[in-house]
Image: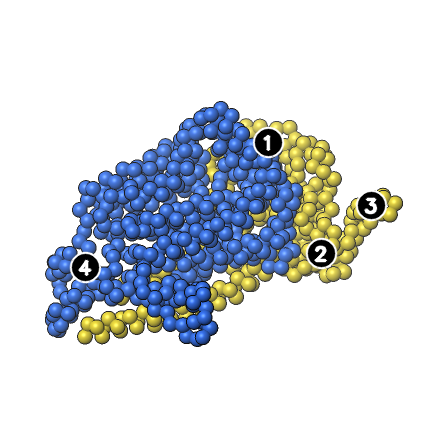
Amino acid sequence: MRSLSRLELLMAFLLALALPGVALAEDGSSAAAPPLGHDYPEIAHQSWSFTPPFGTYDNAQLQRGFRVYKEVCSNCHSMRLLSYRNLGEPGGPEFSPKAVEVLAGQVQVTDGPNEKGEMFQRPARPSDRFRSPFANDQLARNANSGALPPDLSVIAKAREGGPDYIYALLTGYRQPPAGFEVAQGMHYNAAFSGHQVAMPPPLSDGVIAYTDGTKPTLDNYARDVSAYLMWAAEPKLEERHQTGARVMIFLIVFLVIMYLAKRTVWTRLHHRDATHAA
Amino acid sequence: MAHPSTYQPGSGFERWLDARLPVVRVMHDQFVVFPTPRNLNYWWTFGGILTFMLAVQIATGVVLAMHYVPTPEGAFDSVERIMRDVNWGWFLRYTHAVGASMFFLAVYIHTVRGLYYGSYKAPREVVWILGVLILLLMIATAFMGYSLVWGQMSFWAVTVITNLFSSLDAVIPGLGTKLVEWIWGGFSVGGPTLNRLYSLHYLFPFVIAGVVLLHIWALHIPGNNNPTGIDVKSAKDTVPFHPYYTIKDGFALVAFIVLFAAIVFYAPNLLGHPDNYVPANPLQTPPHIVPEWYFLPFYAILRAIPNKLLGVAALMTSISILFFVPWLDTSKVRSTSYRPIYKWFFWAFVLTCIALGYLGSQQPEGWYLIFGRVCTIYYFAFFLVVMPVTGLIERPRALPGSITESVLGPEESGEIEETKNTKETKATPPPAARKRKREEVL
């Protein structure tokens, strides 16, 4: 039955073709092309350390990204799904336990009620969620001329293009082209859908001090905070890639064994046919 | 197929049990020695793959349900909690979400295989009808499961789909609105809606499992169809299910899992929509509401029709028309491989379904709408015109004399070999002679 083994080879070949294709489809930027009828600018691909199949986060980059978030983004944007303890967990920025305590302790959170029935302020503990800059959405809108700064916990998965998009947005502020009307309180941005964004340019060269020798440029800030937001959205990515490698090796060996077993079993049938024919 | 039981209880306990509940006998007769056509190709392995996928979805789903909170306030955050704080939660959730896509990929291949080889034709009509019922239940289950994430796409998909029932207002004023409010459990999609979707999403997979049992039972009465579409004629045409098909299905299953695992571990959000990572907001409609990829062809059909009620009717008909396929097809032969005219229409139909999938992801305007309408017309014409008419006018190609002959060629198959057992018959005859022989056998 030559035709059968040809088909098997074909299947194996198709799989071999499909695998790198799937693996190359980058995590955050993997979604299909956006639907037509809307003005979605082209988002350039950036090179990231966490690209599948073997990518990992760059701890130092995530730590710098957290600094950018803490000093700039967190003034308007919440990250309500993250806790301070996450900053010390494996596969993330991996701050030391001491550093996590200090980072949490710098923030005052509301707790209570105490025995007297009163709410009180205390320094945050690692188990606390990130404190949100505004108590509710109305307050946030009120402070930002009507626009609501979105929560950033899963933003890297909630936008077409993922970290590439965030980087493009943060570096996409330009002078509007001639004839382009920018509405009151809006800013021209090459990466934003419709090119008018309420967020003023948040970063510029030198606004945050870096202590590890990385150049304090807008480009580096944008890159680092994009990587940090990708980690925040996908904190188990490293575990996933590492487990994936083991599972794939196991499965491929299993597949080969199954193929050989299958061939051995079906050869019996061919022998039976041959003896009958003789 | 119905065959005399060959089970021999090996021990005293087995004899005792066999007299009371012959479950071991049933397993032995139906899944070990079960006579299966020897020529099943790899398209026949998707039945086993689908059984595996149902088990995966139930197993991961039961654990996810232990951590999920079915309230509008808690749903989105509980899913993220699973991703972040539950042990192996990311693996369970991604497996379940990607699993739904893989389940549909397999079920579509399985259905197209059945269509191509005429597996719905007598005596397998009931197998086919139960299969279509499973497909319908899967569509309902997947839709409800997607809503549970309570992201923007979840919420607005529920809003759009449940609102389809309001089109019944055009039949009896007020009927549709009342029905929609009854489904919602209120005046808009909200907490009560989410709760009932959750309850039914947990219930339906077990209903599916029940219908799957009936599907397999109904299959085991006439036995498997096969790529030639001709009936099993002698014991030589079959092999025992075990080991021949356990090993072949097993190999195909592992190959399928390789693809499944590659997506789960390296591109888990490949098939999802970014908007579903935005929590549901009843006050803000997303610019484009699109369903999951496996519903896109049906969505394209819905939107191709300008009238809402008729659009909904077309959507319902596009799936339920499959129930009638055994009687719409008038062909005398089962397998499309032997149908020179129908073959072309069949592959055009498959391409149409793929095209509808693409068009469903685009805005219904301009050329997209025109192509959507052309494809919709062909989709229905395939069932209502092509199937009945080609069967009557087409002259099928010559069928092989038996399944064994189709595998080994006429010179080695039983009938010929018994009459002329000489060396020259084993030499391969020229193609023309071979063809003549086939016709003689017919």
Q: Residue under mark 4: which chain is it in?
A: B
Q: Residue under mark 3: which chain is it in?
A: A
Q: Nearer the viewer, residue B166 or B172?
A: B172
User: Which residue does the numbered mark 4 point to in the structure image?
Assistant: B401
Which numbered disc, 3 or 2, marks the residue closer to the eye?
3
Residue B428 horizontal side relative to residue B139, left or right: left
Q: Nearer the viewer, residue B21 or B257?
A: B21
Callout 4: helix, strand or loop? Answer: loop
What residue is shown at x 24% (from left), y 71% (from top)? A273
Mark 3 Cα shell of 10 Å, populated few (<14), some (14-19), many (≥20): few
Callout 2: helix, strand or loop? Answer: helix
User: Which residue does the numbered mark 3 point to in the structure image?
Assistant: A113
Q: Look at the picture and state if B88 lies above or below B395.
A: below
- The Cα–Cα distance between marks 1 and 2, rounded to whole angstroms, is 42 Å
Callout 1: helix, strand or loop? Answer: loop
Q: Nearer the viewer, residue A262 or A238?
A: A262
Q: Nearer the viewer, residue B363 or B390?
A: B390
- The disc label shown at residue B187, or none: 1
Residue A68 horizontal side relative to residue B361, left or right: right
Quarter occupied by the N terminus of chain A: bottom left
**Amino acid beneath label 3:** Pro
Q: Which chain is yellow?
A: A
Estimate the x, y position of residue A241 in percent, counting from the top left.
55, 60
What residue is shown at x 17% (from left), y 53% (from top)? B398
Q: Look at the picture and state if B366 lies above or below B202.
A: above
Estimate the x, y position of residue A253 in percent, counting from the top left.
45, 69
Q: Residue under mark 1: which chain is it in?
A: B
Residue B164 horizontal side relative to residue A121, left or right: left
**Amino acid beneath label 2:** Arg
**Amino acid beneath label 4:** Gly
Disc nearer the start of the sequence (4/1):
1
